[in-house]
Image (cartoon, rainbow, N blue to C red):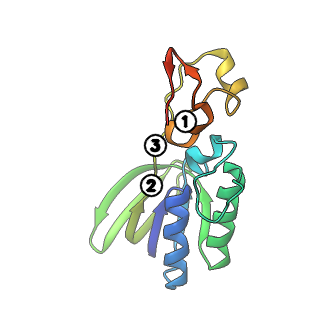
């Protein structure tokens, strides 16, 4: 039985993994279908502490995952298909067919962008098509976006 399983490899999941690994909990981190979360769709992250010049979303996620592994977290790509309480914790069934048992679970699965399904969306992601107003809104300050002027 694992001490801790963390669901999600975005910033929240990686942060939990770093702290848990440093506390010798030997966490297993399971990434879902969007390994690294929505941050991997962002080209330039300018609002994360420690990077005054900004950093690419994919690079930031890779650094966070590497840091978690440095302290002993194990990372695995799979998908939880079933989650059940058991006597001393939880049982997780994975899409790969693997069954895991753990004393504790941290769910840090974040969110997923809802795309329109246009053929050009993928082509222009990070180059005009955004999935995060908080992350990318500043790029459009003073510009007209969908008939609205983006202000400070």
Q: Residue at x 69, y 42 (%)?
A: 43
Q: Which residue is the extreme one toward the bottom?
A: 24
Q: In the rendered structure, which disc, 1 or 3, sits on the residue that comes first in sequence?
A: 3
Q: Around disc 2, counting alpha carbons within 10 Å, would you say few (fewer than 14), some (14 to 19), or many (20 or more)? A: some
Q: In the rendered structure, which disc, 2 or 3, sits on the residue that comes first in sequence?
A: 2
Q: Secondary structure at mark 3?
A: loop
* Residue 35 picture location, percent across and down: 61, 49
Q: Label 2, on which residue?
A: 93
Q: Is residue 30 above or below residue 111?
A: below
Q: CA distance from mark 1 to mark 2?
A: 38 Å
* Placement of the N terminus among the 4 image quadrants: bottom left
Q: Residue at x 53, y 70 (%)?
A: 17
Q: Label 3, on which residue?
A: 111
Q: CA distance from mark 2 to mark 3?
A: 21 Å
Q: Tell which tag, 1 or 3, sits nearer the viewer.
A: 1
Q: Quadrant of residue 62?
A: bottom right
User: Which label was assigned to residue 50?
Assistant: none
Q: Does any portion of residue 27 appear in the rendered image?
A: yes
Q: Label 1, on which residue?
A: 137
Q: Does any portion of residue 99 appear in the rendered image?
A: no
**Badge 1 vs badge 3, beta-carbon distance below 8 Å:** no
């Amino acid at each position: 039985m694992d001490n801790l399983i963390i669901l999600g490899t975005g910033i929240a999941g990686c942060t939990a993994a770093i702290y848990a690994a440093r506390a010798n909990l030997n966490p297993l981190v399971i990434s879902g279908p969007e390994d690294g979360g929505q941050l991997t769709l962002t080209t330039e992250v300018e609002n994360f502490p420690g990077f005054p010049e900004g950093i690419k979303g994919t690079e930031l996620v890779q650094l966070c995952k590497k840091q978690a592994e440095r302290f002993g977290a194990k990372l695995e790509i799979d998908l939880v298909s079933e989650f059940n309480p058991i006597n001393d914790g939880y049982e997780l069934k994975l899409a790969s067919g693997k069954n895991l048992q753990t004393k504790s679970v941290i769910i840090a699965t974040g969110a997923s962008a809802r795309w329109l399904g246009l053929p050009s969306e993928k082509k222009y992601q990070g180059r005009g098509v955004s999935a995060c107003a908080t992350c990318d809104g500043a790029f459009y300050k003073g510009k007209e976006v969908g008939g609205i002027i983006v202000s400070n």
